[in-house]
Amino acid sequence: MNRKEFSELLNQRVLFLDGAYGTEFFKMGIRGRMPIELLNITNPDAVYTLQKAYVNAGVDFLLTNTFSANRLKMQSLKVKENIKDINFHAVKIAKDAAKNSNVKILGDISSTGILLTPLGELSFDEAYEVFKEQGEILLNAGIDGFIIETMSDLKELKAAFLALRDLDNNIPIIAHLTFEENGRTVTGTSVEIFATLFNDLDVDVIGMNCTLTPEEMIKVFQTLSKYSKKPISVEPNAGKPKLQPDGSVIYNTTPEKFSVYMEDFVHLGANIIGGCCGTGPEHIKLMREFIGKTRVRKRETIKKQFLSSRTILRETEPFLIIGERINASGKKNFQNAIREYNFDRMVNLATAQEKEGSHVLDINLGIEKLLDKKHFEKSIIILDKIGSIPLSLDIQQPEFMEVALKEYVGRPLINSSTVEKEKLDTAIRWLKRYGGMLILLTMKNKIPETAQERFEIAMKGIKYLEENGISKDRIFVDPLVLPVGAKKDPFVTLETIKLLSEKGIKTSIGLSNLSFGLPSREGINASFLSLAIHNGLSGAILNSKESSTMNIVFGSLILHGMEVSRDTSTSTGDEL
Amino acid sequence: MNRKEFSELLNQRVLFLDGAYGTEFFKMGIRGRMPIELLNITNPDAVYTLQKAYVNAGVDFLLTNTFSANRLKMQSLKVKENIKDINFHAVKIAKDAAKNSNVKILGDISSTGILLTPLGELSFDEAYEVFKEQGEILLNAGIDGFIIETMSDLKELKAAFLALRDLDNNIPIIAHLTFEENGRTVTGTSVEIFATLFNDLDVDVIGMNCTLTPEEMIKVFQTLSKYSKKPISVEPNAGKPKLQPDGSVIYNTTPEKFSVYMEDFVHLGANIIGGCCGTGPEHIKLMREFIGKTRVRKRETIKKQFLSSRTILRETEPFLIIGERINASGKKNFQNAIREYNFDRMVNLATAQEKEGSHVLDINLGIEKLLDKKHFEKSIIILDKIGSIPLSLDIQQPEFMEVALKEYVGRPLINSSTVEKEKLDTAIRWLKRYGGMLILLTMKNKIPETAQERFEIAMKGIKYLEENGISKDRIFVDPLVLPVGAKKDPFVTLETIKLLSEKGIKTSIGLSNLSFGLPSREGINASFLSLAIHNGLSGAILNSKESSTMNIVFGSLILHGMEVSRDTSTSTGDEL
Ligand SMILES: [Zn+2]
Ligand SMILES: [Zn+2]
Ligand SMILES: [Zn+2]
């Protein structure tokens, strides 16, 4: 099954996944401390029997019995068997069970059980390799697609997804996080953050499973259905776990109740439904019969654009305030501190700018020749650790940008690209691989003098980006602000903003450059900002410590009839 | 001699006044403690002899020997003789001396010797009556014109001038202040303040006399020649006074030196020259011969507009900041304090707003039905007393405005008139009688909805004002700011500003009205102000405590290439 075939299947009707494995093996009398993935070798008949029951229940997909069968998890469970054997046999058994049916096999993948930086010690690259290793075995064994399940860390999910996608560009991948009732993972990532990041990525389906009962999960899933532009899938548990006298747990949502609940998910536009802990062949069978062959409900998804960190989502409309102060350019002490991995000042500036009302933090580490990849990696990780607001990655060297994008958890702003083919191609690759939005400068190798020229260059860049799959609502055009001087350049910038805004193009400027070297900087910046917002400006990298400038943002928006909230953020910023 | 004839004389050549009287009588052996004005009765021959000498010296004007011959000064000098006799005889003697010549007689008037409020206890009205009394006697005796000399208080000069002008609309009046070397009177009024106020008034000539030697006076006179649009006159002393062993004082600038110096004043454009203390017929004769029949030098006068208080001059360009906070409307405690003549809050607000950078203070005493004339009189006097910056008189009732204008010392901003004939006629009368600038509202009895209508109404009002002798540079048009609401009114105001500014019309708005009842007021005000300045706004009544708004003023001006100084005032504000 390639992705096109999978997509066609998704277009036909609501599809069905299988149910739980662990609780079913327990019912079958298989009780012990061994991880159930070992059954693929020690008791393949048991696995076959269960999977055959799911096939008979009418599933469209069987999941391989490989949930924990990655190297790191198996090590921590003291499993000595070769993970290659465990995964290979799992696929073989599933294929046997699916024989003579249309049932497809999804390679099941979940967490390593070790937390990635900054939550734990595992690096992104290590995690990536672990998932790649397991994925490669499953692929070679002949699966039809992947499902990444029960992940609670967006960064680990990203590592797993990128590893699998890098293995095969044409294999369907379903990516799940598991959420608590508040709509966030235990690591603080909300459904909205998950959806808005994965909307950009080359994933086939996103969804959620485990932790919640169907009735708890419905509200969380409703949010997913609003925010996800991808097909969506869902596997709730069969109720709350209850510990039994014999040490087992049972889940008491009956197959009948479960089926009725699952119809609600279909009403919200679910493309794929199945069961997680506590569900068995009876649940799946009844659900399958109850739902039947149903067309997928059309969903209206949110049109707005968002940036996010791991825990904080910022709508970019009506105006994006990007704090400029984490910038080591021309600041020797700051630059030296970063070189010595002293991030105190960076952290203080992040906290201060969030308090001042910045929505996003621009990060510029200064003279890049003095730095190496580690400085970028550590900077991103430290800001993730403190629960920072979203970042604007103001990085020149592509290799450094790549590191930052890899470590970044959320949907970043990539700052920036000129309208030169090589630069645009790189930006397109980043936007597709890591997600995010782009600041596009209205220039090739030099800044055009007239507004018309700047406008035309921007439109050319946008056209190229759109032709390459980057929609224009993911782009902020920067019409370039030069210092106030002899030339009337500020008014060229204003005119460029107007031309772009009349075409519905978002614009953002580096405001403070305007008043470089002048007195009354705050007043000059604020005055220009009011004129720029009047002309349609939709964002600015600015000094949020300047209260006049901040007042202008909110005042201008009210003056122009836009609703604004002056809350500084949607999170306390210290969740981790 | 009527004013037209006087004006024709002024156009022909430099004219000559006479010299001193007191020092000359002393030389003639008349020594005593009696005021010299008594000589008009006790020794008319002595007066005749001196004046005849001045006529022979070649003067164009003789001054009557009536310098101190007003009721109050005579009382304080214990003179019991009737001032009617003293003044009447003075004119008779001067006329005799001038017989068979072209010499004209100027009735000489000076201070009452008692300070006006707030410097002393004398009221404006009392002073006015004293000058009117003396002026009427002189007029009835047949003088050709008046000269008001050696005044050191602008308010007293104003009282004297208005009294004389009210007596006869067609009599020439020359008005002098006496300045110290720093270019200010002892009461703190600068030459610039004097000139810019009297430019508006129906005076024939303004000038200076006494206190300074010619060399000290030349710089002060140079300033007058730049700022005065009226013909100018000057009478320096003949050097510094030196006390002699016999108790007399002598002035040792010789007639030769004096004449050479006086040529410098002619070079600066003096229309009338003469001598004050220490000058005698020899000085005048030699000066007359040395200067000869000379055409008056053309002067370039300053085109800018200024507002002033007694001691502080504010250029209105490039942008006039009018502090709004002395406004008792809707402030019950403030209103009650004013009713009880408690001006503490008013004084604090005046000081605070000056510190914040306001150029001018708007004064609105709240509900005028609750007030009487005394409240307006006392308010103006208290602000004069503390050395306040210039005022914008925001007063509805004409009778209250009249009181305020009378007591005001300097060139005020009259706030405001609609474009209705009766209102305009009243404003024209005030502008001509008391001087100042006007805020003209772009409305008749209701506010027009479109910018074009507001513009046309304003242009109609300006035309009427210009036809009645009020030049358009004395007018700020207020295109009316309404609260941000459902209608797009703020943008109508912006468009009106643009239309007016394209015609070179100055505009000013009541900024804070925009954000009435809204949150983020400061931001809304500041944002709008930036747009308005971009469209050409030249002033605003605003809350100078809003640092964003103040920053916008200075930032916008720099952004638009205008030079600005952020000094909060030209004076310390506590000179009195
Ligand atoms: Zn589960
Ligand atoms: Zn004198
Ligand atoms: Zn402009």
Image (cartoon, coloured by chain):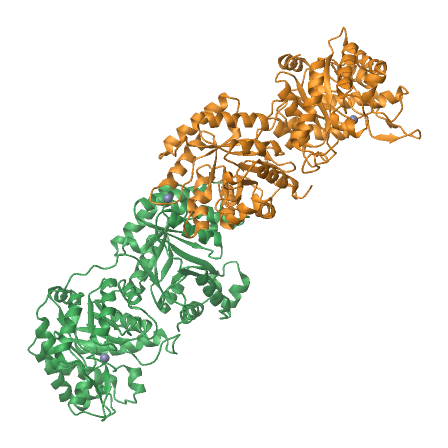
Chain colours: A orange, B green
Quarter in which the N terminus of chain A is drawn? top right
* B445 displayed left or right of B288: right
Q: Nearer the viewer, residue A348 or A537?
A: A348
- Say how many tags the image has: 0
Is B458 left, or right, of A146 in this rendering?
left
**Residue B37 drawn at (x, y percent):** 22, 85
Quarter of the image with the C terminus of chain A is top right
Q: Nearer the viewer, residue A233 or A573?
A: A573
Q: Nearer the viewer, residue B182 or A249?
A: A249
**Residue drawn at (9%, 73%) of the image:** B290
Comparing B372 with A141, the one in front is A141
Q: Is residue B443 visible?
A: no
Residue most extreme to the right:
A245
Question: Residue A239 is drawn in which quadrant?
Answer: top right
- In percent of the image, x 38 and y 75: which residue is there? B117
Q: Is residue A235 above or below residue A542?
A: above
**Residue B468 visible to an observer of this rendering:** yes
Q: Residue B239: x percent and y percent? A: 21, 80
Residue B308 screen position, x and y as percent: 35, 64
